[in-house]
């Protein structure tokens, strides 16, 4: 899911950050990162400032920072992203005040190999002025699939975070073999849209395809002190029929939910997801969960047909590391 701050447009909540390392994003080359390595710019965590923290190169900064340029030219960074259609770019200069670039420009290319001096780049964001300690979001009107981006900064300085919001290009080779895929994984275009609480762990962690690192690498709500239960609404990468559900409570031992359930539906673009989701078709009835283990539900899964969204309820509260919804896209369903 695309991380949001108070200035983030609502449409971004339905997009994936294609520049996250867990999506396969990585720094390919950088002109200079003397003060702070470029890889920090791709961190999924919000940037922080630690007063008094210095390293061998100077003040420690949570982002990419080049040295002060004493020659002509500008600095740049080439990044491999999860291949996909880019819908928006966010350049975040949080905590960079006297050391942010005066301007930035972003280009993209699509290639099977790493870009070189012969690569043709397409401009997505024209050279635009930046401000310190702020976030700037650019809407991209382009339908091409890109696999690399180049961030140019003028002339030098620091960027806390670069977020590339878009829709992943779904790999369909396994679909052709009739194999089930995780319909809600971020690699398939799945997005965590909304939840009632994520005090201890972000809801987007549920959809990660990476091994669970620790208890912080999951969705966890605060302790509930009143009646009710917690829930999260997820958008599938594309419409599909759920055939098998995997609920992983890895590392959640004294704080796992007592049970969980799943519903599915096909809301319209202007629907009130929260209220409408309460009446969606049941896919998994409320079933018990245990601590620190993978739960596999297949015979218990009810056929709700092809759905675009699901609501995952936990009772009454707690933490779940991963949720996987296995099946096939609606247009490639297996018989039976």
Image: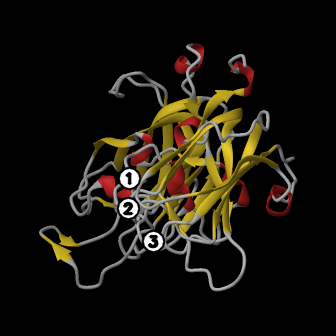
- Along the horizontal axis of the image, is 207 left or right of 41? right
Instruction: Point out the tag, 1 or 3, that comes first from the N-terminus.
Output: 3
Question: Badge 3: few (under 14), some or many (20 or more) residues near its Cα, within 10 Å?
Answer: many
Q: For residue 326, what is the image quadrant?
A: top right
Q: CA distance from mark 1 to mark 3?
A: 28 Å
Q: Residue at x 41, y 46 (%)?
A: 22
Question: Badge 2: few (under 14), some or many (20 or more) residues near its Cα, within 10 Å?
Answer: many
**Above or below — where is 299 with respect to 74?**
above
Q: Is residue 301 visible?
A: yes
Name the residue tied to disc 3.
Answer: 94
Name the residue tied to disc 2.
Answer: 251
User: Residue 104 versus residue 28: which sits nearer the camera?
Assistant: 28
Query: Of discs 3 and 2, which sits in the foreground?
Result: 2
Query: Of discs 1 and 3, which sits in the foreground?
Result: 1
Secondary structure beneath disc 2?
loop
Residue 110 position in % (x across, y down): 49, 26
Instruction: Point out the tag, 3 or 2, that comes first from the N-terminus.
Output: 3
Q: Residue furthest left?
A: 56
Secondary structure beneath disc 3?
loop
* Tags 1 and 2 touching, CB below 8 Å: yes
**Above or below — where is 263 with respect to 240?**
below
Secondary structure beneath disc 1?
loop
- Along the horizontal axis of the image, is 280 left or right of 232? right
Residue 62 position in % (x across, y down): 33, 67
Query: Of discs 1 and 2, which sits in the foreground?
Result: 2
Q: Residue at x 87, y 47 (%)?
A: 268
Q: For residue 244, what is the image quadrant?
A: top right
Name the residue tied to disc 1.
Answer: 212
């Amino acid at each position: 899911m695309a991380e949001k701050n108070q200035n983030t447009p609502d449409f971004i909540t339905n997009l994936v950050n294609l520049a996250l390392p867990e999506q396969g994003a990585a720094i390919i080359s950088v002109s200079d990162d003397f003060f702070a390595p470029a890889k920090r710019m791709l961190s999924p965590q919000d940037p922080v400032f630690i007063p008094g923290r210095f390293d061998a190169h100077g003040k420690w900064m949570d982002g990419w920072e080049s040295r002060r340029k004493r020659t002509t030219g500008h600095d740049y960074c080439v990044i491999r992203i999860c291949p996909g259609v880019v819908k928006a770019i966010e350049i975040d200069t949080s905590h960079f005040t006297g050391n942010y670039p005066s301007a930035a420009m972003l280009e993209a290319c699509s290639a099977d190999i790493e870009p070189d001096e012969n690569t043709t780049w397409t401009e997505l964001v024209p050279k635009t002025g930046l401000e310190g300690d702020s976030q700037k979001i650019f809407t991209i009107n382009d339908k091409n699939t890109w696999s690399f981006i180049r961030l140019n900064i003028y002339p030098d300085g620091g960027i806390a975070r670069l977020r590339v919001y878009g829709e992943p290009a779904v790999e369909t080779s396994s679909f052709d073999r009739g194999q089930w895929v995780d319909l809600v994984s971020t690699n398939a275009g799945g997005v965590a849209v909304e939840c009632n609480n994520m005090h201890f762990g972000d809801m987007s962690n549920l959809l990660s395809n990476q091994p669970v690192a620790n208890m912080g690498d999951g969705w966890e709500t605060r302790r509930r002190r009143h009646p009710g239960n917690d829930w999260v609404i997820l958008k599938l990468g594309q419409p599909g029929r759920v055939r098998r559900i995997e609920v992983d409570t890895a590392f959640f031992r004294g704080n796992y939910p007592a049970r969980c359930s799943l519903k599915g539906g096909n809301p319209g673009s202007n629907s009130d997801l929260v209220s409408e989701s309460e009446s969606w078709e049941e896919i998994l009835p409320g079933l018990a969960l245990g601590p620190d283990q993978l739960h596999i539900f297949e015979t218990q899964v009810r056929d709700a047909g092809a759905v675009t969204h699901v609501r995952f309820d936990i009772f009454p509260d707690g933490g779940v590391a991963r949720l996987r919804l296995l099946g096939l896209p609606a247009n490639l369903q297996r018989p039976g």
